[in-house]
Image: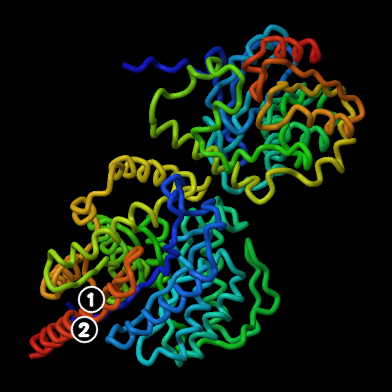
């Protein structure tokens, strides 16, 4: 720990009212029929999920995190900036992390404007991430997966130019031409809100974050991969003259706290199972549209997927991924250990897991807010004092 | 113990040329006037069907960049870039006038080459060509099909292609197909057809033969009539009991091409 600690609460806002026959569908992404979406149930879920984000702010989280997916029951946030706009007037202290809209899916000037609006509206509490977007997003949107990485780099370049240079400027690129790049408003934070790349640790996205000196928000990476990713990013960023700070490396952890370890598992495991078995369920073709991955990366992932096949097994998930389910003491110990191991003090807590009911999310957030976050903050502060003496 | 797959390139001599910086593998066999074959989007089933043509012609089968044994060049991003690539390659090979046969994606490319450089193409054969949208008889979108479902869709008799396919999961084979799919996506993800094709097909003034498998489930044989309606001198030959890979499935189709080109 470097003396401080940061907690984010990440919500996926899943549509949880799946039809009884949903197991018949190989994928709940891309082509899962939207006839199963009931807007009345959707409304109730939005009400509930927005309240959960606000509760995270109340109980002491440092930030709330929203993100974007398309054509899926996994997430009801096709446009995360809308969610951010809905909560900004109500959130008192927490930062708002839109992690985020894949820049490839919007015109870059428009995304620069949208985020600048949110930053100004929130008085400089916005953080953004620039995901490439999962393979699934490229089946849902009219953007070529084979040129996605080049377009991604150009889009980020345009957004940064729009934020850091006084307009009007011009941009003559491979994908976009701007004769008057001159967005109003500009961001509240200078030179711009803190930025991250989001990804699963592919060499290309790590290199991009290193080059730009951005943070890297990893999603669903194994423990081994997270360690390698953070080491690689630090080393590669240094080669580009950037120093990556621990808080730039949020560690995503599925977290659930209850009175006892047994009770925590009893209450959380079925939802973790839903998350891995159902919410994330999709096909290899949807995961990797043509040209989206390098051939080497495709082969690596195909080999890994073979290993992960088979029925859900909580012990295996626990073994491979960052899952902290237990008492407050156990969770504190676990987070501190992992933070030290991968070199971060920034935890991105997945605390509304899969189809978890509202009461469990409230219970989890309450425990985290009362017993985990203050304790870790106090310990980090005392570390800081020791280091200062 | 798995049986070794037959060499899909048996019978050809392999050469490599560097064309505008990209490694281009070229298969050749036979002697005579040049006959160039443009392959489709999958190269795994090889070119054995083309060997009878070597009795009369110098058969030249180049791998398009991004396919088979040729190298990658992400700078080639539309069909016209491939036309330019072949101008360079033909210069390197000393090929001026040629007979041109194109299959599927290669049929689209052959039509495009021939409409832009018609004086060089003496006779043109389009085998199940891609390229038209075919509003009422649409072209199947091969990019949206799971790769493992594609081979069976291409033939009526699976035994014809079975020897060229791995018996189980095969990472290298999967990787090769993914690479070719990526090249294809780069070319035509946004539009898996050319809206302008029908506008310029009248420039195919050379004798042209359209060959199709009657049971083509990827590009319906009914599209042959659409092509013919735009091309001044086109004949159609449709072969029963064959799918998209009509040249692999029907020796009669191979012979018909040979007779037409002779």
Q: Furthest residue to the right? A: B232
Q: Furthest residue to the top? A: B55
Where residue B52 appears, as percent x and y from the top left, is 66, 9
**Do badges 1 and 2 share one subunit?**
yes
For disc 1, the neighbor class at 10 Å (few under 14, some 14 to 19, many from 20) is: many
Quadrant, the C terminus of chain B:
top right
Above or below, B215 relative to A87: above
Camera sees residue A301: yes
The residue that label 2 is drawn on is A4
* Residue at 23 percent of width and 76 percent of height: A345
Marks 1 and 2 close (CB-CB < 8 Å): yes
The residue that label 1 is drawn on is A345
Camera sees residue B98: no
Residue in front for this viewpoint, A29 or A334: A29
Q: Is residue A322 left or right of residue A354?
A: left
Judging from the image, mark 1 belongs to the subunit labelled: A
For disc 2, the neighbor class at 10 Å (few under 14, some 14 to 19, many from 20) is: some
Where residue A61 appears, as percent x and y from the top left, is 29, 83
Quadrant, the N terminus of chain B:
top left
Quadrant of residue A6 within the rendered picture: bottom left
Residue in front for this viewpoint, B10 or B24: B10
Above or below, B252 relative to A255: above
Secondary structure under badge 2?
loop
* Residue at 44 percent of width and 73 percent of height: A45
Secondary structure under badge 1?
loop
Where residue A242 appears, as percent x and y from the top left, is 34, 73
Judging from the image, mark 2 belongs to the subunit labelled: A
* Residue at 83 percent of width and 32 percent of height: B227
Whichever of labels 1 and 2 marks the residue nearer the N terminus, that label is 2
Q: Is residue A104 left or right of residue B198?
A: left
């Amino acid at each position: 720990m470097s003396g401080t600690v940061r907690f984010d609460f990440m919500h996926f806002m899943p549509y949880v009212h799946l039809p009884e026959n949903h197991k018949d569908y190989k994928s709940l992404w891309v082509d899962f029929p939207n006839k199963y979406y009931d807007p009345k149930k959707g409304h109730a879920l939005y009400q509930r999920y927005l309240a959960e984000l606000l509760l995270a702010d109340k109980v002491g989280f440092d930030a709330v995190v929203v993100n974007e997916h398309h054509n899926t029951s996994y997430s009801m946030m096709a446009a995360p900036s809308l969610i951010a706009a809905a909560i900004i007037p109500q959130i008192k202290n927490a930062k708002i992390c839109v992690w985020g809209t894949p820049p490839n899916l919007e015109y870059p000037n428009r995304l620069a404007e949208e985020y600048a609006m949110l930053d100004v509206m929130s008085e400089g509490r916005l953080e953004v991430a620039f995901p490439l977007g999962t393979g699934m997003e490229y089946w849902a949107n009219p953007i070529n997966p084979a040129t996605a990485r080049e377009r991604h780099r150009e889009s980020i370049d345009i957004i940064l130019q729009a934020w850091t240079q006084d307009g009007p400027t011009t941009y003559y690129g491979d994908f976009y031409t701007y004769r008057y790049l001159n967005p109003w408003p500009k961001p509240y934070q200078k030179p711009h809100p803190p930025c991250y790349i989001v990804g699963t640790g592919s060499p290309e996205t790590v290199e991009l974050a290193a080059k730009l000196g951005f943070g890297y928000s990893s999603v669903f990476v194994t423990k081994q991969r997270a360690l390698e990713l953070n080491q690689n990013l630090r080393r590669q960023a240094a080669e580009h003259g950037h120093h990556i700070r621990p808080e730039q490396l949020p560690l995503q952890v599925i977290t659930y706290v209850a009175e006892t370890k047994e009770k925590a598992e009893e209450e959380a495991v079925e939802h973790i199972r839903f998350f891995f078995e159902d919410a994330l369920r999709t096909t290899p073709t949807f995961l990797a549209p043509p040209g989206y991955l390098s051939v080497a990366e495709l082969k690596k992932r195909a080999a890994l997927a073979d290993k992960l096949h088979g029925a859900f097994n909580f012990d295996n998930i626990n073994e491979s991924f960052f899952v902290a389910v237990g008492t407050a003491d156990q969770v504190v110990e676990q987070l501190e250990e992992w933070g030290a191991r991968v070199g971060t003090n920034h935890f991105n807590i997945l605390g509304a897991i899969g189809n978890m009911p509202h009461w469990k999310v409230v219970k989890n957030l309450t425990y985290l807010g009362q017993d985990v976050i203050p304790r870790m903050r106090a310990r980090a502060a005392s570390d800081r004092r020791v280091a200062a003496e | 113990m798995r049986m070794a797959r037959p060499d899909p390139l048996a019978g050809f001599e392999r050469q490599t040329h560097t064309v505008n910086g990209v490694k281009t593998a070229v298969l050749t066999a036979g002697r005579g006037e040049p006959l160039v074959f443009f392959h489709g989007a999958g190269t795994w089933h090889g070119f054995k069907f083309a060997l009878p043509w070597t009795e009369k012609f110098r058969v030249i089968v180049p791998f398009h960049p991004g396919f088979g044994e040729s190298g990658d060049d992400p700078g080639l991003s539309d069909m016209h870039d491939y036309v330019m690539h072949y101008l360079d390659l033909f210069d390197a090979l000393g090929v001026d006038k040629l007979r041109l046969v194109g299959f599927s994606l290669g049929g689209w490319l052959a039509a495009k080459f021939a409409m832009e450089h018609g004086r060089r193409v003496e006779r043109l054969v389009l085998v199940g060509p891609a390229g038209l949208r075919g509003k009422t008889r649409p072209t199947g979108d091969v990019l949206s099909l799971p790769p493992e479902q594609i081979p069976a869709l291409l033939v009526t008799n699976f035994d014809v292609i079975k020897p060229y396919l791995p018996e189980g999961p095969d990472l290298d084979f999967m990787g090769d197909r993914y690479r070719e799919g990526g090249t294809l996506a780069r070319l035509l993800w946004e539009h898996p057809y050319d809206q302008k094709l029908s506008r310029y097909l009248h420039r195919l003034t050379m004798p042209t033969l359209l060959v199709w498998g009657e049971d083509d489930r990827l590009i319906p044989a009914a599209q042959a009539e659409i092509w013919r309606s735009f091309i001044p001198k086109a004949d159609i030959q449709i072969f029963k009991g064959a799918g998209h890979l009509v040249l692999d499935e029907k020796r009669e189709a191979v012979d018909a091409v040979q007779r037409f080109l002779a």
